[in-house]
Image (cartoon, helix red, strand yellow):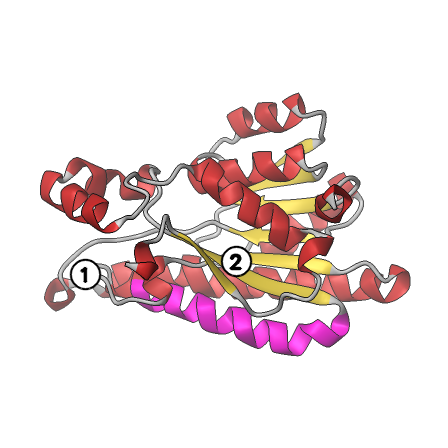
Amino acid sequence: MSSMFDLDGRKAIVTGANTGIGQGIAVALAKAGADIALVGRSAAEETQSLVRAEGRKATLISADLSSIAPVGDVVDQAVSDLGRVDILVNNAGIIRREDALDFSEDDWDAVVDTNMKTLFFLSQAVGRHMVKWSSQDGARGKIVNIASMLTFQGGIRVPSYTASKSGVGGLTKLLANEWAPKGINVNAIAPGYIATNNTAALQADETRNRQIMERIPEGRWGDPADIGGAAVFLASRAADYVQGHILAVDGGWLAR
């Protein structure tokens, strides 16, 4: 059974891998045997060291994913460094908080462009690469998007984030429909409340932190490592018949 989760020899791109959920996923994939291209605009040397400590190759690709401009170069460099790309984890994302009545166009565009537009066009570029080799050797490509609790819920004070993550859920299903016959699995993980830089403001807000904790049956904020196992599953042969699924890893938040 363990061989079904073995990623030995597989090559992955993980975006936003410098910290938080991206780092947790990159390390988990490395533990399962994958080599990783770590993509982001911030330095990811710590993640690189953690991946290499698992005996896997880790290459750094500097790219600002707030626009689609670097998408082609990211894929080309990953293929050059690793030989091919078997797994793409679209983790890079941003959030802006403001009441809907006061939310600005700049904050709308920044979040939607990073969280949804770049995700689609990077998936497209990697998908074109995966289609070429999957038809040759029969191995399946794996794309794992990072969705959110706000893929299912509305939330408050994050209109562009909610819209973008709802869009990620829809795109995950659309791409699965189109690419399943081409040998590519497309799924998503919806993290619950995970202790990262993106949620620092919520953790620091005594009232909101208490409200959040009261609803989580597990009784704690999640850790980035909690997302790693789900990523390994969706990237592995164990998930070959899983398509268009959004897997909540939320400590029971949605069940409450």
- State yes or no: residue 146 in magenta: no
Q: Which residues are magenta?
A: 162-182
Mark 1 lies on residue: 156
In the image, residue 176 lies in the stretch drawn in magenta: yes
The residue located at (71%, 39%) in the rendering is: 34
| Residue at which label 2 appears | 145
Residue 152 higher or lower than 192, as above or below? below
Question: Few, some or many C-alpha atoms within 10 Å of disc 1 (few <14, some 14-19, many ≥20)?
Answer: few
Q: Residue 143's x, y, as percent?
A: 62, 58
Amino acid type at circle 2 is: Asn
Could you say which disc has been placed on residue 131 in the image? none
| Residue 109 visible in the snapshot | no
Give the quadrant of residue 19: top left
Establish if 183 lies above or below 214.
below
Q: Which quadrant of the structure image shows residue 175? A: bottom right
State left or right for residue 142 relative to residue 256. Answer: right
The correct choice, above or below, for 134 with respect to 222 in the image is: below
Q: Does label 1 or label 2 sit earlier along the sequence?
A: 2
Give the crowd class for mark 2: few <14, some 14-19, many >=20 residues within 10 Å. Answer: many
In the figure, 199 relative to 169: above or below?
Answer: above
Magenta region's main secondary structure? helix
**Residue pictured at 72% horizontal, 36% vertical:** 33
